[in-house]
Amino acid sequence: MQLLAKYSFLILLSLFISCDDDANANSKNETKTNDDLSNIVEIAQGNDDLSVLVQALVKADLVGTVQDAKDITVFAPTNAAFTRFLGTLTGISSLDDFDTAEEIALLKNVLLNHVVSGAAASTALSTTYTSTLATGPNDAPISLYINTADGVVLNGVSTVVIADVVGSNGIVHVVNEVIGLPTVVTFALADATNFSSLVAALTRADQPAFATILSGTENSPFTVFAPVNAAFTNLLNSNDSWNGLADVPGALLTAVLQHHVIAGGNVRSSALSDGLVTPNTLEGDALTVNMPGTNGAAANLVDGSGNADIEVIVLDVQAINGVIHAINKVLIPNTTN
């Protein structure tokens, strides 16, 4: 399963959508020594279609950070991408509207969400989660989901359109959309290979507005134990009268989904320990952690019904409003209380 490659270092599929001039420029760069190459800021300054990115770096006081960094990968949004992104922000129409310290801090974090440690050429990119230099709750590094099934798509919203612009301190890949700060819902939607069943359950018409709740900040941060698609298949197979998700009674489905969410805490793997009893889930029952887990998993969870074979198979997918841990089975609450 693609998601289950735990935090393999940033590896990506080749994508060469560049004009002849870009190809020639890269060819020339390859013959230069590292000292002869432009740094990443200079590369952006030399590309008219990245002028808004340069202005944003200046506004957020990140020019020195980016040009002095060593071995980084930058996903650089085009001017058109920034125009679309700014249009989605309340009260913001241009970079000049970022006035307060809070607004500038937001801009800085968005820009850092495009920067990854390690210089990764297109031949080293593949489907995985990695960490950016942006930070979320408790200064935890925010994750980036890279999908190479059809080109290179980042968090399901931004595509690499020019790859492998080599600089003295890293590599630039130009992208067609700004990669906004992700919520836990962002990752569920982006990773359909593993979470499409979870999304279908969360968005079923008779369910609470889970997508809205988990996209917001009220009662955040959230810790979500997210079952992969195979977990839902196993759940449906456990009841002969269930032929699909639509057959699960609404109240039961609500309780089950709520049993996967802890509100008000960003519980990362570093906080897990053997025998730990978590805060109560939204459903009301707590979970118990057993470490190490079975079959090489970092941990097992004991759900409200006492099932102890739920393996935590991916850890610490960090969003701006919470953290996701993928699990191999659906958690069942105590249905007798």
Image (cartoon, grey):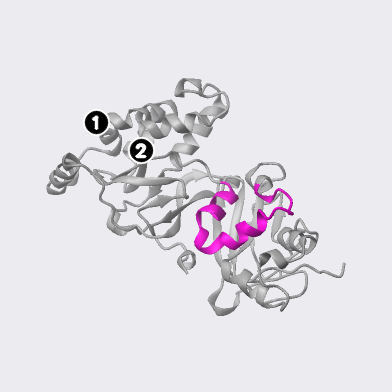
Residue 56 rendering spot, x and y as whole percentages: 41, 29
**Real-space Cα distance between discs 1 and 2?**
15 Å
Q: Is residue 125 magenta?
A: no
The answer to whether any part of residue 187 appears in the image is: yes
Q: Residue at x 70, y 76 (%)?
A: 308
The residue sitting at 65% across, 67% down in the picture is: 273
Q: Is residue 55 left or right of residue 304?
A: left
Specify the amino acid type for callout 2.
Val
Give the answer, above or below, for where 157 lies relative to 297.
above
Q: Position of residue 9 (x, y in %)?
A: 39, 60
Q: Residue at x 70, y 57 (%)?
A: 261
Q: Quadrant of the C terminus?
A: bottom right
Q: Residue at x 35, y 52 (%)?
A: 118
* Residue at the far right in the pictured view: 337
Counting from the top left corner in percent of width and height, residue 241 is at 73, 75
The numbered mark at residue 46 is 1
Per the rendered image, the range of residues in magenta is 183-211
Verify whether residue 188 appears in magenta: yes
Q: Nearer the viewer, mark 1 or mark 2?
A: 1
Res 268 seen here: no
Q: Which circle marks residue 66 in the picture?
A: 2
The front one of 56 and 249 is 249
N-terminal of the two: label 1 or label 2? 1
Secondary structure of the residue carrying numbered label 1:
loop
Q: Does residue 299 lie above or below 48 as drawn?
A: below
Task: Work out whether 172 lies above or below 52.
Answer: below
